[in-house]
Image: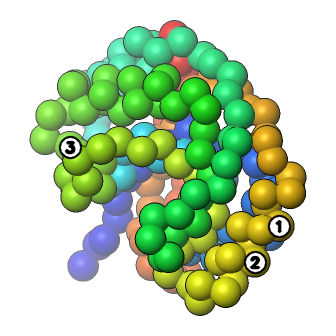
Amino acid sequence: MDRSQSALIVAVPEADPVVGRHRDRLDQAAAWGVPAHITICYPFLAPELIDEQVLAGLRQAAATVPAFSYRLNAVNWFGERVVWLAPAPCDPLIALTVAVTARFPAVRPYDGQFDEIVPHLTVGHDKPVADLKTAAADIAEHLPIAARITSMRLATGCPEPGHTWSTLAEFPLG
């Protein structure tokens, strides 16, 4: 059975020097070739449903949010399972997610499991808490990280070991 999926992300290459080695050990997505990123919508549509009309809708959604600069200012946690970096300001990222879901109302970030949109850059998840805490302490010494978002990516792949994800399209922000 094909388990291919798609995701909408904004890449954060400015974070790689600080989080890259930690993500390699602690974030499964790094093994799939997914760069340091902030998720806009995952899962998005099944890849076979992505056509020119979908791509046009994503272009329109991206164009509603101007390119912007921000900082990754703080290390945060979802329980003791996920360590992540918080972007500030986060309002443009929330606006981008809202613009996407307004055009694709059947799609909800994380399948609608969470009521609130919390933009974040995952460093690690579902690994020993001691390893996550060590990474968090190391990364905190290198904050803030200044970054700029100018586009949103549509990536596709299979969320299983041995598979890699690739960029299907990139959409400039407005």
Coloring scheme used: rainbow
Q: Which mark is residue 107?
A: 3
User: Which residue is the site of mark 2?
Assistant: 134
Amino acid carrying label 1: it is Asp
Could you tell me which secondary element the residue under label 1 belongs to? Answer: helix
| The label number, if any, that marks residue 42 in the structure image | none
User: What is the x, y in percent for residue 146?
Assistant: 78, 33
Measure the alpha-carbon separation of dots 3 and 1: 36 Å
Image coords of residue 82 (percent x, y): 51, 69
Residue visible at 59% across and 45% down in the picture:
86
Q: Is residue 107 left or right of residue 71?
A: left
Q: Amino acid at mark 2?
A: Thr
For label 2, the crowd category at 10 Å Cα-Cα, with few meaning under 14, some 14 to 19 and many 20 or more, is few
Q: Residue at position x 30%, y 44% from top?
A: 116
Q: Position of residue 51 (x, y in %)?
A: 28, 35
Indicate which disc residue 138 carries.
1
**Distance from the alpha carbon under mark 1 to that under mark 2:** 6 Å
Instruction: Characterize the local packing of mark 3: few (<14), some (14-19) or many (20 or more) Cα atoms within 10 angstroms.
Output: some
User: At 58% across and 57% down in the image, what residue appears?
Assistant: 76
CA neighbours of label 1 inside 10 A, class few (<14), some (14 to 19), many (20+): few
Q: Earlier in the sequence, mark 3 or mark 2?
A: 3
Image position of 130 with respect to 153: above or below:
below
Looking at the picture, how far across and down is residue 39, in whole percent? 47, 47
Of circles 3 and 1, the one toward us is 1
Toward the viewer: 105 or 159?
105
State the SS at label 3.
loop
Tell me the distance, in whole angstroms, between the alpha carbons under discs 3 and 2: 35 Å
Q: Nearer the viewer, residue 152 or 17?
A: 17
Instruction: Residue 151: name its quadrant.
Output: top right
Question: Is residue 44 positioned above or below 54 on the image?
Answer: below
